[in-house]
């Protein structure tokens, strides 16, 4: 990347020098001066655009490489684990309690493997799918609580580790939204999984629904007290394959697709998603907004 940036700067400098010489030599000839300035601007614009394009492509290739490495690890680790348990069961006689423990661990690894595959497939679907979605009216609060129960089971959490806060401003009424139930479950589950994954050793996640603007939209806020996100990374985390760099974050495995899928689903439903954080070690709040169906 540094090579292409330096090359672009050198080419721009050379163009400036050549055009400056042209202007000095032809400053009395208005026609030649006019065409020289236009030619200069065209060269500068082309060089800048070409440099920007090259830098973006290099970054995208780096993200692709990171994604391939992450997916390879996420696929290889559970497969290796399952194979090890199966070989142990095949070669040795184990008691019933240990056998059941092996079965449970293999099922957990299978769920992890299936989750990785589904996430990759879902990322492709939300990026390329243009067909009409099967939308229906549903109670968003019930869907969120359902996803919370699944997250507690999947991550073996105590009820206190992921707390539901009563919706603000709804007075016990249902929160109706219109959308694809499966896609909305995927988005909410990805947000909850991220909150758990980036909470560190102490998991404390709060979930709440709010109405930010005149009853027209409903906002799901998922707040964790984990490692946080630097301010300059808050928008980048929603890009495809992007993962925040850092010693602490590098140790957390992932594909860089979770929040990209969330953003794609939010946009497809006329909503939006954004992140807030006070910086590293300050926790993160993910807000997922959708249009609300009027009662």
Image: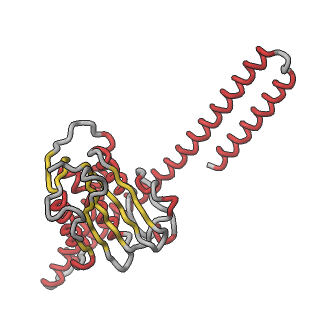
Considering only vertical position in the picture, is 220 above or below 201?
above
Whether residue 30 appears in this view of the structure is yes
In the rendered image, which quarter is residue 259 located in?
A: bottom left
Query: Which residue shows up at 31% across the image and 61% down it?
Result: 191
Q: Which residue is more in the foreground, 168 or 46?
A: 168
Q: Which residue is more in the foreground, 93 or 25?
A: 25
Image location (x, y in percent) of residue 110 = 23, 65
Considering only vertical position in the picture, is 71 above or below 18?
below
Whether residue 83 appears in this view of the structure is no
* Image mark count: 0
In the rendered image, which quarter is residue 210 located in?
A: bottom left
Query: Which residue shows up at 18% across the image and 61% down it?
Result: 141
In the rendered image, which quarter is residue 30 located in?
A: top right
Q: Is residue 14 left or right of residue 254?
A: right
Considering only vertical position in the picture, is 80 above or below 21?
below
Image location (x, y in percent) of residue 47 = 65, 34
Image location (x, y in percent) of residue 180 = 19, 48
Query: Which residue shows up at 70% across the image and 23% down it?
Result: 39
Q: Residue furthest front?
A: 214
Query: Which residue shows up at 20% across the image and 80% down it?
Result: 92
């Amino acid at each position: 990347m540094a090579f292409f940036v330096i090359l672009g700067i050198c080419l721009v400098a050379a163009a400036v020098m050549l055009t400056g010489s042209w202007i000095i030599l032809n400053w009395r000839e208005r026609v030649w001066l006019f065409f020289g300035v236009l030619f200069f601007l065209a060269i500068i614009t082309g060089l800048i655009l070409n440099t920007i394009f090259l830098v973006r492509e290099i970054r995208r290739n780096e993200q692709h490489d990171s994604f391939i490495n992450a997916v390879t690890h996420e696929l290889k680790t559970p497969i290796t684990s399952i194979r090890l348990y199966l070989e142990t069961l095949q070669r040795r006689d184990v008691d019933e309690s240990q056998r059941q423990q092996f079965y449970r661990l293999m099922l957990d690894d299978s769920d992890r493997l299936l989750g990785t595959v589904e996430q990759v497939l879902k990322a492709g679907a939300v990026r390329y799918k243009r067909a009409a979605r099967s939308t229906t009216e549903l109670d968003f609060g019930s869907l969120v609580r359902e996803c919370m129960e699944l997250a507690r089971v999947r991550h073996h959490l105590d009820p206190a580790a992921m707390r539901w806060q009563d919706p603000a401003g709804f007075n016990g009424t249902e929160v109706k939204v219109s959308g694809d139930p499966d896609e909305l479950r995927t988005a909410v589950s990805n947000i909850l999984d991220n909150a758990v994954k980036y909470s560190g050793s102490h998991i404390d996640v709060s979930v709440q629904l709010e109405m930010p603007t005149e009853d027209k939209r409903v906002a799901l806020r998922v707040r964790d007290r984990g490692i946080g996100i630097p301010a300059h990374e808050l928008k980048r985390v929603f890009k495809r394959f992007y993962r925040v760099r850092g010693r602490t974050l590098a140790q957390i495995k992932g594909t860089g697709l979770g929040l990209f899928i969330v953003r794609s689903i939010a946009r497809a439903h006329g909503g939006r998603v954004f992140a807030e954080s006070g910086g590293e070690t300050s926790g993160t709040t993910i807000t997922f907004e959708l249009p609300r169906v009027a009662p």
